[in-house]
Amino acid sequence: MEKIEFSEDQRKRIVENAGRFALEAGRKYFACAPGTFEGICRAFRSEGIELMPIELENAIHMGMMGLHGGTAATGVGT
């Protein structure tokens, strides 16, 4: 993986957007792990930075859905 370079202004926008996007996604899924992951990916993408291929992002996102409500809705880990 190569190092990603971005300006201080981009960094600030990515952080702000990640929070906003994660909040939106968290409300959509009622889960923080996939919402946070989606928010981070969307924030970087909004700046033209692809962190990973979309197929990999989708696979990771589906795996994170198992963390909803703790580990598989057990409440453990929340």
Image (cartoon, rainbow, N blue to C red):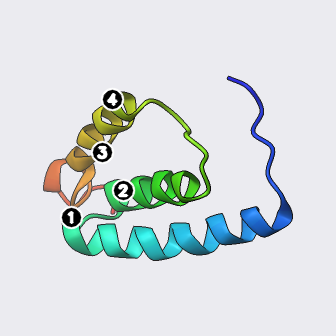
Label 3 – label 4 distance at C-alpha: 14 Å
Going from N to C along the chain, the mark reached first, 1 or 3, is: 1
Residue found at x 34% / y 64%: 32
Q: Nearer the viewer, mark 4 or mark 2?
A: 4
Numbered badge on residue 29: 1
Label 3 – label 2 distance at C-alpha: 6 Å
Residue corresponding to mark 3: 64
Q: Amino acid at mark 4?
A: Glu
**Residue furthest top as drawn:** 1
Quarter of the image containing the C terminus? bottom left
Q: Residues within 10 Å of mark 4 (few under 14, many from 20)?
A: few
Residue 25 lies, with reference to residue 53, above or below; the image says below
Residue found at x 50% / y 32%: 52
Residue 78 lies, with reference to residue 4, above or below; the image says below
Label 4 – label 1 distance at C-alpha: 19 Å
Residue corresponding to mark 4: 55
Label 4: element kind: helix
**Residue furthest left as drawn:** 73
Contact (CB < 8 A) between labels 3 and 4? no
Residue 57 lies, with reference to residue 33, above or below; the image says above
Label 2: element kind: helix
Q: Amino acid at mark 2?
A: Ala
Contact (CB < 8 A) between labels 3 and 2? yes
**Residue furthest right as drawn:** 8
Going from N to C along the chain, the mark reached first, 4 or 2, is: 2
Q: Residues within 10 Å of mark 1 (few under 14, many from 20)?
A: few
Numbered badge on residue 33: 2
Going from N to C along the chain, the mark reached first, 4 or 1, is: 1
Q: What percent of the width, then of the height, locates residue 50?
A: 55, 40
Residue found at x 22% / y 57%: 68
